[in-house]
Image (cartoon, grey):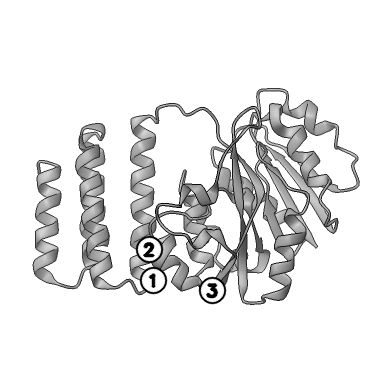
């Protein structure tokens, strides 16, 4: 059995379509849990239409906003009866064969803990913009075809640079693997998904389906606030440091990535407050530098940090 968790916040406009593309899946052995995080739009009215639907096992309306997407994930997983989880974000949609295709891969590959599909990127009007494969075309052609990869290899060679699974709606995973790595995503505001995938790939492999079975909604972008830019950078840094501490990353590749991080810091310098700069600097010295084994290089990198932050 599979559990579909639909976490929602103010996506009434897309919610009906989201739920319908779940209900019309060709694979039907699933339950649906709908979690609303204190929406202020018409979401409640849409959700209540499904109150007595036989596929809907739980509907929960938060009385106040949780402030964390990842807390909602964990709430849903705590309620889940299925052995496999699909977190279907409320503004996305899916091909009718999404579950059947991905769960078929899990059934055939017991070592695989996460399987994800190619995605269409769509706008607010459901127009297709491009695909996931188009996004990474300049990096690698690996997403042009199906693959299965060892978890540690995926992290060291790909997940170390970005979440790779750009949209949680595009993947399903084994509940047992998720539970084995704890509720660590709640510590993050923006990078909880990335960190969770990394943790899961410490004990499971990953598979990819090149067919675009997921539709990832891309909203009109607004300029990210300086505070969120700092959170995004700092949390990404924490994920990368965790990878350095728990996976074998070749020294030359580690060195190149750290210099790239320093270059990013230089670009973002004017957008961080003095306190934020100090926080990043302290974290780098304690966590990133200890993962570089050559003392002269530690010193050189440390000096670059001081120059960047005018320390």
Work out how far the residue at label 2 is from the one at label 1, CA to CA, in angstroms: 6 Å
Q: Is residue 15 left or right of residue 199?
A: right
- For residue 71, the mark is none
Which residue is at a point 68% across and 22% down the rendered structure image? 41
Q: Which residue is mark 1?
A: 246
Work out how far the residue at label 2 is from the one at label 3, CA to CA, in angstroms: 15 Å
Q: Residue furthest top?
A: 41
Quadrant in which the C terminus is drawn: top left
Pick whichever, 142 or 106, lies toward us.
142
Which SS class for mark 1?
A: helix
Which SS class for mark 3?
A: loop
Q: Earlier in the sequence, mark 3 or mark 1?
A: 3
The reply to whether the C-beta atoms of the residues labelled 3 and 1 are less than 8 Å apart is no
Mark 2 burial class by Cα count in 10 Å: few <14, some 14-19, many 20+: some
Q: Which residue is mark 2?
A: 242
Mark 3 burial class by Cα count in 10 Å: few <14, some 14-19, many 20+: some
The reply to whether the C-beta atoms of the residues labelled 2 and 3 are less than 8 Å apart is no
Q: Is residue 25 left or right of residue 41?
A: right
Q: Is residue 269 above or below residue 117?
A: above
Which SS class for mark 2?
A: helix
Q: Is residue 164 above or below residue 34?
A: below
Which residue is at a point 35% across and 74% down the rendered structure image? 248
Pick whichever, 166 or 275, lies toward us.
166
The reply to whether the C-beta atoms of the residues labelled 2 and 1 are less than 8 Å apart is yes
Q: Which residue is mark 3?
A: 203
Which residue is at a point 71% across and 49% down the rendered structure image? 5
- Give residue 31's position: percent from left, percent from top: 81, 53
């Amino acid at each position: 059995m599979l559990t579909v968790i639909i976490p929602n916040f103010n996506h009434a406009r897309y919610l009906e379509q989201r739920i319908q593309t779940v209900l019309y899946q060709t694979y039907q052995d699933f339950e649906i849990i709908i979690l609303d995080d204190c929406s202020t739009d018409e979401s409640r009215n849409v959700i209540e239409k499904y109150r007595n639907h036989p596929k809907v096992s739980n509907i929960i309306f938060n009385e106040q906003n949780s402030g964390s997407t990842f807390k909602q994930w964990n709430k849903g997983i705590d309620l889940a009866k299925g052995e496999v989880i699909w977190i279907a974000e409320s503004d996305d949609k899916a091909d009718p064969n999404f579950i059947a295709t991905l769960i078929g891969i899990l059934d055939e590959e017991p070592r695989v803990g996460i399987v994800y599909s190619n995605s269409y990127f769509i706008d607010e009007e459901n127009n297709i913009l491009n695909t996931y494969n188009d996004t990474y075309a300049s990096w690698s052609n690996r997403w042009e075809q199906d693959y299965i990869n060892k978890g540690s290899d995926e992290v060291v060679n790909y997940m170390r640079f970005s979440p790779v699974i750009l949209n949680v709606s595009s993947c399903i995973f084994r509940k047992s693997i998720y539970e084995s790595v704890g509720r660590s995503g709640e510590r993050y505001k923006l990078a909880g998904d990335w960190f969770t995938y990394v943790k899961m790939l410490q004990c499971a492999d990953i598979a990819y389906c090149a067919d675009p079975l997921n539709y990832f909604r891309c909203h009109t972008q607004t300029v990210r606030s300086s505070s969120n830019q700092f959170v995004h950078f700092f949390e990404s840094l924490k994920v990368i440091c965790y990878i350095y501490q728990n996976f074998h990353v070749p020294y030359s590749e580690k060195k190149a990535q750290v210099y790239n991080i320093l270059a990013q810091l230089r670009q973002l310098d004017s957008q961080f407050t003095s306190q934020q700069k100090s926080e990043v600097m302290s974290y780098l010295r304690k966590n990133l530098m200890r993962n570089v084994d050559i003392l002269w290089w530690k010193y050189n990198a440390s000096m670059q940090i001081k120059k960047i932050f005018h320390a």
